[in-house]
């Protein structure tokens, strides 16, 4: 099957970033786009939709509000349409429950005919002579047919994949799993005698707290190791949060590649810390247990990296090193949960473009300030990327609020006019002497 029409753009992958682009583009006259997603429905981190957890950003960081507060696809309109606006008002929370954010995004996806699920993009080619275009080959999982679509521009939004450290691959996923699969394995995990969480950050803390709450009922031992020097909370000071602003993203992008790489570690506490409420809940639960028992089968240890995993008769043996003291030791456990973050999910067909684009190093491609890949030979057909942007846009790589600001720029470029005005919002800081406000 082939669709000979040439669309203005095609989005590959439907996560929050491309779903936002789809919702915003729906309101733009004269711009036609399609979006393909290999999964059968929208589901945002289903393995981590733990009851009681919230987004780490306010509800204003929905799919559209940062660009168009009047959009029918806003979170507030979702509440209104579902008769939940008064309840949310009385809920008196600024952050959205994570489960509700997922349901909101599913609602938006259901309203957008341009979002096609169950379609796996298998190949992309660039061709045409007088009017160049991208040809997108798609496998339709429902009809089991191969389809072909054409577009002037592409938007890569394939998101990220779990980062599994070397030495931890290939084990049964029922025993050694990434936090992104936690809820899928939760029942069997809690039947084990020993459970170990490796890593730090919000995901690690949420999984650890969930396990901690059921520990006495289920009777397992629980350990939490991280190579970080401590279990630090997220930096939420208002001035610090101004680094999640278009002003800072623009400043960061204009730094040299070396300066950008040097700056990335400074974002750690802004992006990878634990919410204060979660840290306090863990501490309070541990404290209350000491009222009636002196010791608890819980180990919490920073400064400790996991280097090796071996199978033993009743589970696994972890080799760990307290790196500050340079002391290696072993820890036996039945289950291992890896809170080791994510890496860019770049599809195999992207190899076709590797020789055509400019790279800043062997893994990081060069990206313009408005999110276009830089080709060695300039072409009129843009290839935008929402994936693998940390090195080029810093705090703007994964932040939900800034992802909507990013989509403003992309749609303005595709439309050839300012359909979503940018540059009006300012912060109180300046990040360079070259720019005064």
Image (spheres, rainbow, N blue to C red):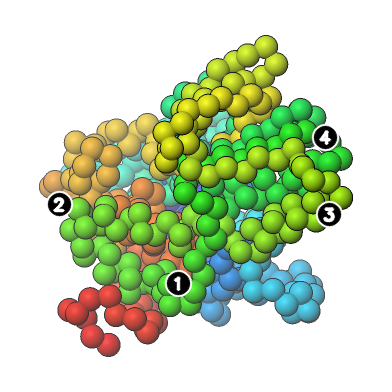
User: In front of the other: label 2 or label 3?
Assistant: 3
Q: Nearer the viewer, mark 2 or mark 4?
A: 4
Looking at marks 2 and 3 on the same chain, the residue that comes earlier in the sequence is marked by 3
- Tell me residue 13's x, y (percent): 48, 46
Dot placed on the residue nearer the N-terminal end, 4 or 3: 4
Quarter of the image holding residue 355? top left
Label 4 sits on residue: 219
Q: Residue at x 48, y 43 (%)?
A: 303
The kind of secondary structure element at disc 2 is loop
Q: Position of residue 401 (x, y in %)?
A: 48, 68
Q: Nearer the viewer, residue 73 or 58?
A: 58
Q: Earlier in the sequence, mark 4 or mark 1?
A: 4
Disc 3 is placed on an element classified as loop
Q: Which of these two is toward me, 340 or 128?
A: 340
Return the residue at label 3.
291
* Tag 1 residue: 241
Residue 378 tag number? 2
């Amino acid at each position: 099957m082939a669709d000979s029409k040439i669309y203005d753009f095609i989005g590959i992958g439907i996560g929050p970033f491309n779903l936002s682009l789809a919702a915003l583009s729906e309101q733009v006259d004269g711009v036609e786009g399609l979006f393909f997603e290999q999964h059968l429905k929208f589901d945002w981190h289903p393995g981590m939709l733990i009851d009681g957890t919230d987004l780490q950003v306010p509800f204003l960081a929905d799919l559209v509000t940062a660009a168009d507060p009047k959009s029918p696809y806003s979170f507030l309109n979702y509440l209104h349409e579902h008769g939940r606006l008064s309840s949310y008002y009385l809920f008196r929370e600024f952050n959205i429950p994570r489960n509700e954010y997922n349901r909101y995004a599913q609602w938006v996806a259901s309203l957008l005919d341009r979002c096609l699920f169950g379609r796996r993009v298998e190949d992309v080619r660039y061709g045409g002579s007088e009017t160049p275009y991208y040809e997108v080959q798609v496998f339709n999982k429902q009809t089991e047919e191969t389809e072909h679509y054409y577009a002037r521009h592409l938007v890569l939004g394939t998101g990220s994949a779990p980062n599994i450290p070397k030495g931890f691959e290939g084990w049964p996923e029922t025993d050694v799993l990434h936090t992104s699969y936690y809820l899928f394995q939760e029942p069997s995990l809690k039947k084990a005698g020993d459970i170990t969480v490796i890593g730090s950050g919000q995901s690690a803390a949420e999984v650890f707290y969930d396990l901690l709450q059921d520990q006495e009922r289920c009777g397992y031992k629980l350990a939490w190791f991280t190579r970080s020097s401590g279990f630090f909370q997220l930096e939420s000071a208002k001035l610090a949060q101004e680094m999640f602003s278009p002003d800072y993203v623009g400043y960061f992008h204009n730094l040299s590649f070396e300066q950008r790489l040097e700056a990335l570690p400074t974002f750690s506490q802004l992006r990878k810390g634990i919410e204060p409420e979660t840290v306090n809940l863990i501490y309070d639960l541990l404290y209350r247990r000491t009222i009636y028992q002196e010791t608890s089968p819980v180990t919490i240890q920073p400064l400790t990296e996991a280097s090796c995993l071996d199978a033993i008769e009743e589970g696994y043996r972890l080799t760990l090193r307290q790196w500050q003291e340079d002391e290696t030791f072993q820890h036996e456990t039945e289950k291992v949960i890896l809170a080791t973050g994510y890496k860019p999910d770049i599809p195999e067909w992207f190899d076709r473009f590797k020789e055509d684009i400019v790279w800043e190093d062997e893994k990081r491609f060069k990206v313009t300030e408005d999110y276009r890949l830089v080709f060695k030979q300039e072409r009129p057909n843009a290839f935008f990327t929402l994936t693998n942007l940390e090195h080029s846009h810093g705090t703007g790589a994964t932040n939900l609020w800034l992802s909507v600001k990013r989509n403003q720029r992309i749609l303005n470029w595709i439309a050839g006019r300012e359909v979503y005005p940018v540059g009006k919002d300012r912060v109180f800081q300046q990040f360079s002497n070259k720019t005064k406000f």
